[in-house]
């Protein structure tokens, strides 16, 4: 348990002095609380020896009242210092976690960690915030109380102090067994909380598919099973702790009785005055109360320890290095705007990009085609440095992207994704994400160029309309045009289009193609698409398969080859979504 306390202190950082100051007031509170016992014993001694007069009675009473008042002040200061530190600490931790998540490679978010992140934020950190400081305050107060109590007993009689010290060792032995048992149970309990969170997120996000395929009962059953499992794990946790709690209670009762027996023996053998004996009788059952409380509170400490483990597991994830000091200079003649040099990249120990090299010059359009899972989107993501490559180099204007600050790199790239995500905010603010310092006129102009101005103005509150999380209140085409307006406003020199028209209808596709034309004017364009009519005019087409470039050239050159590209066109020639070959 001491290790957990030290861990919390280490975590506290700049708030540690406040917490340590609170410990001082906790110690003073314990001293004052036990000091009242000493004064009571003194009062009994004077009463039995008929030396207690009115003035002494008032004096001792005043001292007791002063101790009570000072004890209240110490309790207030201790709680105030620790509680305030706890809330400020958790606020900083959440900000640190957000900053850390922002710097993690995208792979971390695609490996099934969303549920873990949500669980840590909504369950673990809330538990720490609500319990850590108050539990720590009570824990330290009890530890100090027990130390002071043993000290007073030793003052009364060294043999009583020895009994109390041995009792403390016995408590520590059985209490630590309870604590260690709780550590393992807490781990299982918190992991189940994570699975429950993942299940809830999966159920909520997949509601459309669940209803469409009439899987509501099946998925509800899965969610219900997770609720039941969480309930079972919580009950199991308590059931495992109860036997240890009973043992702690039995030890407490035995040691308290032993304290009375030893005191009686010392009194009978005249090794202890009657006043001390009466004092021990009055407070015998309070001697080991702090230890009993400590180990009953250990359940919270074990859960807290596992919560901290889970938080640390996220914070220890390796961030993308952002130590670049170079800057992107204006374009140099004959230097490619984008260049991949023998790039290799592995995902989950499997190589998905194997020795890819290509160049794109300013103002050119590069198209990436190939079967699903071939590595097209991965190549685009590597350019934006969502992941770091294993080998090779990726250069922009002759500069290795790893030598550039991430902020500067991303300022030079705009991306339009197949699946658009808009935040629960106004349409205006969603577009402004492209350039936070843009004027209202620039935002309006970007919306017009993206072909979304008219439909925005038709909404009840225009640009101030609040859209649902993820853009749930808009159609796919409307969301896509707003995302393009965002990129137009950003005005980055490199544009990546990842299946930007894949999920829209024919009417919206025409509008989006017009918006994309506006977006790409004078830009270096990398486009990923299955619809060949969107890429047939590209300056260069790369056919990607199994993480390698299998074919390279213009549409006309590749059509003359009896290769993968030609086969794609032949197979899909009847699909209006693909390039339709003209009869010669």
Image (spheres, rainbow, N blue to C red):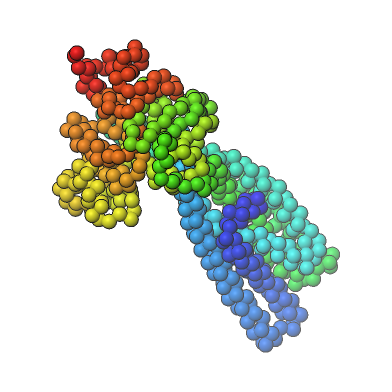
232 shown above or below 276: above
Residue 506 located left or right of residue 122? left
Q: Residue furthest top?
A: 562
Closer to the camera in the image, 573 or 98: 573
- Asked if residue 102 can be seen in this view, the reply is no
Q: How many marks?
A: 0
Residue drawn at x 26%, y 49% is 427
Closer to the camera in the image, 549 or 365: 365
Residue 528 occupies quadrant: top left
Tell me the quadrant of the picture where the C terminus can be found. Answer: top left
Closer to the camera in the image, 157 or 298: 298
Residue drawn at x 78%, y 65% is 154
Whole-percent x, y for residue 124 in the image: 49, 47
Residue 237 occupies quadrant: top right
Residue 144 located left or right of residue 200? right
Residue drawn at x 32%, y 45% is 491
Whole-percent x, y for residue 238 in the image: 54, 43
Residue drawn at x 50%, y 27% is 342
- Asked if residue 442 can be seen in this view, the reply is yes
Whole-percent x, y for residue 325 in the image: 52, 48
Q: Residue furthest bottom?
A: 55
Whole-percent x, y for residue 24 in the image: 64, 67
């Amino acid at each position: 348990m001491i290790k957990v306390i030290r861990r919390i202190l280490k975590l506290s950082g700049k708030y540690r002095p406040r917490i340590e100051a609170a410990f001082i007031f906790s110690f003073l509170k314990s001293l004052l609380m036990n000091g009242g016992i000493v004064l009571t014993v003194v009062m009994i001694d004077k009463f039995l020896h008929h030396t207690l007069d009115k003035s002494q009675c008032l004096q001792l009473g005043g001292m007791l009242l002063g101790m009570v008042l000072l004890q209240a002040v110490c309790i207030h200061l201790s709680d105030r210092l620790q509680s305030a530190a706890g809330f400020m600490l958790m606020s900083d931790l959440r900000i640190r976690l957000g900053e850390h998540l922002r710097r993690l490679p995208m792979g971390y978010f695609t490996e099934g960690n969303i549920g873990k992140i949500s669980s840590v934020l909504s369950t673990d950190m809330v538990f720490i915030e609500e319990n850590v400081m108050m539990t720590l305050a009570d824990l330290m107060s009890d530890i100090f109380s027990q130390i002071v109590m043993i000290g007073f007993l030793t003052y009364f009689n060294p043999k009583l102090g020895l009994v109390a010290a041995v009792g403390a060792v016995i408590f520590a032995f059985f209490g630590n067994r309870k604590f260690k048992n709780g550590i393992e149970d807490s781990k299982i309990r918190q992991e189940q909380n994570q699975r429950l969170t993942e299940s809830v997120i999966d159920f909520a996000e997949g509601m459309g598919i669940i209803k469409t395929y009439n899987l509501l009962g099946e998925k509800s059953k899965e969610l219900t099973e997770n609720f039941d499992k969480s309930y079972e794990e919580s009950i199991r946790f308590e059931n495992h702790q109860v036997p240890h709690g009973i043992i702690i209670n039995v030890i407490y009762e035995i040691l308290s009785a032993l304290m009375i027996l030893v005191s009686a023996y010392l009194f009978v053998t005249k090794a202890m005055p009657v006043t001390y004996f009466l004092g021990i009788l009055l407070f015998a059952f309070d001697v080991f109360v702090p230890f009993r409380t400590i180990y009953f509170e250990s359940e919270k400490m074990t859960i807290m320890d596992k919560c901290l483990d889970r938080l640390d597991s996220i914070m220890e994830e390796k961030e993308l290095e952002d130590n670049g000091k170079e800057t992107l200079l204006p374009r140099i003649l004959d230097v490619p705007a984008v260049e991949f040099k023998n790039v290799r990249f592995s995902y989950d120990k499997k190589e998905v990009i194997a020795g890819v090299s290509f160049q794109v010059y300013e103002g050119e359009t590069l198209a990436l085609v190939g079967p699903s899972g071939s590595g097209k989107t991965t190549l685009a993501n590597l350019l934006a440095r969502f992941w770091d490559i294993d080998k090779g180099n990726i250069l922009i204007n002759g500069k290795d992207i790893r030598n550039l600050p991430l902020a500067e790199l991303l300022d030079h790239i705009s991306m339009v994704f197949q699946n658009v995500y808009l935040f629960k905010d106004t349409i205006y603010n969603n577009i402004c994400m492209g350039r936070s310092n843009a004027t209202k006129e620039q935002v309006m102009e970007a919306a017009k160029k993206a072909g979304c101005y008219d439909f925005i103005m038709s909404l009840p509150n225009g640009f101030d309309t609040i859209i649902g999380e993820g853009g749930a209140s808009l159609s796919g085409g409307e969301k896509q045009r707003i995302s393009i307006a965002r990129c137009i406003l950003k005005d980055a020199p490199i544009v990546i289009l990842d299946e930007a028209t894949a999920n829209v209808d024919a009417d919206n596709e025409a509008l989006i193609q017009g918006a994309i034309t506006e977006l790409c004017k004078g830009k270096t364009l990398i486009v990923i698409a299955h619809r060949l009519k969107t890429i047939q005019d590209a300056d260069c087409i790369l056919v990607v398969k199994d993480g390698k470039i299998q074919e390279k050239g213009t549409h006309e050159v590749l059509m003359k080859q009896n290769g993968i590209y030609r086969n794609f066109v032949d197979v899909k020639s009847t699909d209006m979504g693909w390039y339709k070959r003209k009869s010669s």
